[in-house]
Amino acid sequence: MIKTDILIIGAGPVGMFTVFEAGLLKLKCHLIDALPQPGGQCAEIYPKKPIYDIPAFPEVLAGDLIDNLAEQIKPFQPGYTLGERAENIEKLEDGSFIVTTNKGTAHLAKAIIIAGGLGSFEPRKPPITNIANFEDNGVEYIIKDPELYRDKRVVISGGGDSALDWSIFLADVASEVSLVHRRNEFRGALDSVEKVAELAKLGKINLITEAEVKEIHGQDKVESLTIKHKTEGDLLLETDHFIPLFGLAPKLGPIGNWGLEIEKNAIKVNNALDYQTNIPGIFAVGDVNTYPGKLKLILCGFHEATIAIQYAYQRINPDKKFVMKYTTVGGVEGFDGTKKEAKKAVVKSLA
């Protein structure tokens, strides 16, 4: 049983920032996410996509935003349950909750903040009849451990940042990398497109455009693929792994069965007060919630998380009076004046 003050469901940018706001109030957080790493869509789908509406950053890449958030919350040492989906919830007599994942990991928390973006994500699968037969036997929709492909033949399908970035990365890992895309143009970052084109010229990536993977062949695992080319017809390509990277489809998932009030696949909250749901002790922030005038922006999610944490603190500590302090006055443990003074003391002793 993992015990924490606040259980955050969703480790995207809003969920990560929630850790920071909770940490300022000395509240311990643990995050659950179905993806294998923190960052949500920003890390998984478009890490190189520029974002323009984060205060003090005229432009920041989505992946860099996640890196900065990870650094910001590091002093508060949050816990993580990654690669697992929040499945079942039980409310105890004292008002706390037990949340169990699809893999049986149980979490006990005094409050829950759902920051699941558009919900849990499931990979978009290409319409290949027998693809399910090869899942985890040569077909992977998410790359969790690049070393799995060391000295293997790999075929990646897709035209976005994930397909481009992993093709570039695996070019130095796999024995052979083929990138299949149905168009000549790619949707990813220009520098990634140029890098793939350069690697293709050097013979490190087999670039196949205007083509789609139509069939998978093999006995117990993937052995070859049939690729339908626009002008050359059917091509047979031998491979050890097929990785279709077509993005992730958002679904509210099991959270939709928790008794929460749902409207158009989003969780209704009280935005006039605390961003709490119809179940006391469960809050929802970010793109997963809805209320009159809702804007689906990371910036708005940051604000909602800040407010929700204040009320979660009052729920967890009903006998304590909360007095808000500016970080410019109180500092942040791990980045505060005490740490700076300690560094000065070291310099002085060395002198």
Image (cartoon, helix red, strand yellow):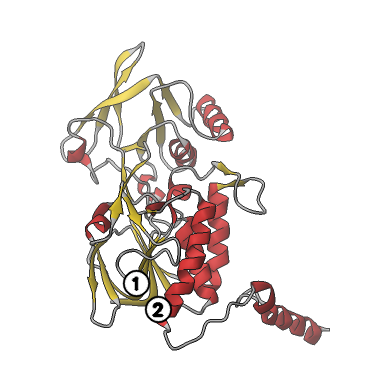
Q: Which mark is residue 126?
A: none
Q: Residue furthest top?
A: 231
- How far across and down, in percent of the image, does residue 213 sit? 30, 26
What residue is shown at x 48% (from left), y 48% (from top)?
A: 295
In this rendering, the answer to whether 136 lies above or below 302 is above
The front one of 243 and 177 is 243
Give the Cα distance between marks 2 and 1.
7 Å
Q: Residue at x 54, y 48 (%)?
A: 62
- Give residue 281's mark: 1
Nearer-N-terminus badge (2/1): 1
Q: Using the rendered view, name the quadrant where residue 175 is placed.
A: top left
* Residue at image coords 49%, 56%: 301
For numbered disc 1, what is the local secondary structure? Answer: loop
What residue sits right under mark 2 in the picture? Answer: 315
Question: Which residue sits at x=55%, y=56%?
Answer: 67
Taking depth in this image into account, of 256 and 233 the one nearest to the observer is 256
Q: Is residue 28 among the parts visible in the rendering?
A: no
Position in image of residue 13 (x %, y %):
49, 56
Which part of the image, by quadrant, shows the N terminus? bottom left
Q: Is residue 142 left or right of residue 137?
A: right
Question: Dot 2: what SS?
Answer: helix
**Image quarter of residue 93:** bottom left
Pointer 1 local density, CA inside 10 Å: few below 14, some 14–19, many at least 20: many
Residue 320 picture location, percent across and down? 48, 87
Image position of 91 with respect to 185: above or below: below
Instruction: Tell me: residue 36, above or below residue 339.
Output: above
In this rendering, position of residue 328 left or right of residue 39: right
